[in-house]
Amino acid sequence: MRRFILCVLGAAALAVTAIAILPSLISSDWMRAELGRQLSSATGSSIAFNGPVKFSAFPSLAVVAEDVTLSAEAQGVTAEFAQVTGSVAFSSLWADRLRIKEISLDQPVIILDEKAAEKTTPAQEGSEETRSSDPLPGLAALLERSAIDSVSITSGTFIRRSAARPEEVVSDVELALSAPDIDDAFSLSASARMGERNYEASFTISTLRSLLGRQPADLDLTVQADPAPAPGLSSLSASGQVTLNANGSYQIRGGEVETGEQAFVLNALFVPGKRAHFLVDLDADRLDLTPFIDATPAPPQSKGPAADTATDAGQRAGLQFLAGFDADVSINAAAITFGEMSASDVSVSAELKDGKLAVALGQLGIDAGVLTADVATDVRSDDPVFRGRLSSEGLDIGSLSVLADRSVPVSGALTIDAGFTFRGRDAEAIRKTVDLAGTIGLRDAAYTLPGIADETMREVKAKKITARIESLAKPVRVAGRLHWRNKPVDVDLQIPAADTILAGNLSAEGMPLKLQVTMPDANLSLDGKAALPGTYAGKLGFSTADLSAFLAGLGQSGAESIGLLAFNGHVDAGATGVSFQKASISVNGVEGAGSGSVEFRTPLKIMTALNFDELDLAQLAGAQSPAPQAKASKGAEPADVPLDLSSLRSIDATIKLNARKLGYGKVFAGPVATSLVVSDGVASLTLPESPFYGGHVVASLKADGSQPEPSIALQASISGASAAPLLTDMAGFKYLEGALKARFDVTGAGGTTRTLAKSLQGTADVAFSDGAVRGIDIANVYNNLVSLMSSGFKQDDSKATTFTELGASFAIEGGVARTEDIKLVGPLIRMTGNGAADLAQSTLNFRLEPRLVASLQGQGAEISTDGIGVPVVVEGSFAAPRIYPDLSDLLKNPDAALAKLKDFGLPIDKLPIGDLLNGDGAGAAVKDLLGGTLDKALKDNAFKQEQQQLSIEEIIGGDPAPKPDEAAVEIPPNEEAAKADAPTELPANGTEVPSEEADGPVEGFFKQLLR
């Protein structure tokens, strides 16, 4: 380009000379042709004057030529000029120096074809090697012979073409050059439009002679851009003294550069040649970057082809003009500020060699941290790629947040060790092409959770947490240990940064993520997409071994009855609610699956449909099934657990349930399809007719939490259920068999389970058919009364009293179910009875009055048992009741007992009754026993019974040791040697056995009979 300018200037000088000599001697046509030939020969280009050429001699010698063309194919340059004007002073005809008053190029269109320029021959290249790229010596030589008042270009256009890229256009070129004398100032001013931006520049050297004489010359340069690339770069000015060194290089010492109200000390060296070389050092005491950063988004640009071409041209020109020279640049600043952020001892160096640019940030001290970086690219490329590395041992996050002009709720140190690549020089291009590989970490960090009032829950700390990046095309993995509420929290997070963070679509489209959080008492996993407004869609997994303890750790109360909780499913969560699909749920070990939704309103609205294999409402509510015990501790009561249904007030729910088994504790019905409805603090569950222990059940349950004291209401109807497994599962009672038909209507209220149980009231009707009472055979009792009276009764679960019907109706009041109409009908036995079951204490107390049929084989009418008095007592806990015959009335009247025994067909005729009852021998002793001692013993026992109710052990096994104030019963001498057979202890389950004490008189009597 410089050669082209010199050619134009030389051609203009020759033209002016020709104007001075030939206009009056030669015709204009011949002059136009000869002028074109001479100029072409002098410049090495093809110059043609295609339009009219006008000459004038006064007041100055001038020529005006229209439609002039220039072609320099070797250099790939072609030009068209609408008009070329040149004039010289008339005095130049007799002076030693030619004075050019004006050279004006109007509307030139200059085209540089890089493809043609690349075809330069080696010979041309060699010859070009000898030429200097420094235009000043040639210009000075021209000025030694001439003076130039003005060279101008008006409305020029510069076009650069290449087969590898779109056309580049610089339009609206305006240029003015003035070099009146080698001892005068040389000045150049120009303006042009590149893309959407206008540029203006001016350049002045005080004197070319001083410069060429290796003496300092004053230099001034100004550049302006509109619109500015950045607020602080709208203008640049440089000044100083320039000196030409002996090796042909130009040096500036102690110069000044000002841009954006920032001042630098400039020291520079320019070495001309085929590849010019610049060395520049800029030093500043303080540099404020604030004016150089434009936070305002760039306005949208037209998408038309012309706009795109111009923009591309501006971008490429901004880098590719660097390919023509080499440079070494260093920038040093004692302090750099940006807003409230400050940096110290900053050094930046750049090296440009053979089209390759490398920039290194040697040090950037930010508060207590230091940042280093380097980047390199090939400026010759049409689409240059920038590669570099960024590292820091620790940058204060609070100071860095100022760079983004926003506050962040994170404190600590940011560590970086990452390589990067990108294309382009604007934010949009960088965002689309940038890639990273390395690590970014936080050290000694603290994060403040938003929207939490409890200060103890706001802060999350991290000693060290690291993000590992293989590529922005792959997920970024963030892992480390946090500390929250003095508990460790291990976090493993994966986010695809290229599609989210860099794309800037966190608010609109959300951020895909995978998150795994492990705490001592809970685990959380997410695999979906989250957005900043607080929405999430994707898989969610959560589990805790104790939800109540987990919530307590968060400073929350509630869910006291829930221990184990696990959830896995697809969740769509937003600010107003959450829904889930294909979810599996486990609460206190009760596992289900289904879908549903929750709307965050008051009250909370829940709609779900859940399927269960086995739904245990007791387990779901947190009840623990106590292990069955052989014998309940005397006076022991079931555990009292708080009962709070107030949470029902905050829920409006409809939960559809499908369960293969639905029940409470060990009692289940099913399969069942029903709905749990919660409204106005009342939960209602209706159980339609469902299979139940071989029969069917229909039930409804209401739990009312709308009042300060919770209450329940249960209605149930059972038909055809197998009693033995049902009663065993329900209460651990395994002594009744048969088919059960029952109806219950029970209500209760209370703040604890014990209070609720003690408040139960209502009615119950039960009926058993074709069953048995286990633990006792009533017929066998009467068949073995003699043995029982002598050796005692042992409860035997293998024995049973069969029946065809057993029924009773109960009135429940205060947690106690009482009945007066127990009725049993069996093949050998008829029984009536009464008693009570304490539902709060889980105890029984029933007394049954049996009547035998006429024959122990089951034939004949009933026989009254009055006079024998052997009722059956059922008492004790549900799980381990005692069932035994009460012989106390029998022993009070032995004469009637013997008669009844004979009536029953017992073999008393084989006993030595006659000898025992006559007055001879041993019989006297027996008679005495019957008539005296026995009577006395019975009377004493009767007296004791008035003072204290005798137990079955006392009746069967004799009186306990007498108290000091009671008279001992005398035993006849002939009976002292009589000893009882080996006694049997009463088993733990409450069955009656003989006492280990010495035989009493009554027992001795019966043993004497059986001897």
Image: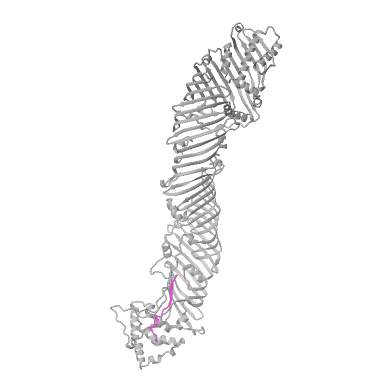
State the residue lying farthest toward the bottom. Answer: 920
Q: Quadrant of the C terminus?
A: bottom left
Q: Is residue 782 above or below residue 388?
A: below
Q: Is residue 597 shown to the viewer in this render?
A: yes
Q: Is residue 754 above or below residue 173?
A: below
Residue 347's x, y, as percent?
Answer: 47, 30
Of residues 488 and 726, which is closer to you in this image?
Answer: 488
Of residues 680 and 342, which is closer to you in this image?
Answer: 342
Q: Is residue 18 above or below residue 306?
A: above
Residue 189's x, y, as percent?
Answer: 56, 19
Q: Quadrant of the N terminus?
A: top right
Q: Which residues are magenta?
A: 879-894
Residue 445's x, y, as percent?
Answer: 44, 42
Of residues 233 and 711, which is closer to you in this image?
Answer: 233
Tell me what residue is drawn at x 60 percent, y 11 percent. Answer: 100
Is 892 inside the magenta-drawn segment? Answer: yes
Q: Is residue 154 shown to the viewer in this render?
A: no
Is 366 inside the magenta-drawn segment? Answer: no
Tell me what residue is drawn at x 34 percent, y 83 percent. Answer: 939
Of residues 731 and 99, which is closer to you in this image?
Answer: 99
* Colour mapping: one colour
976 relative to 623 in the view: left or right = left
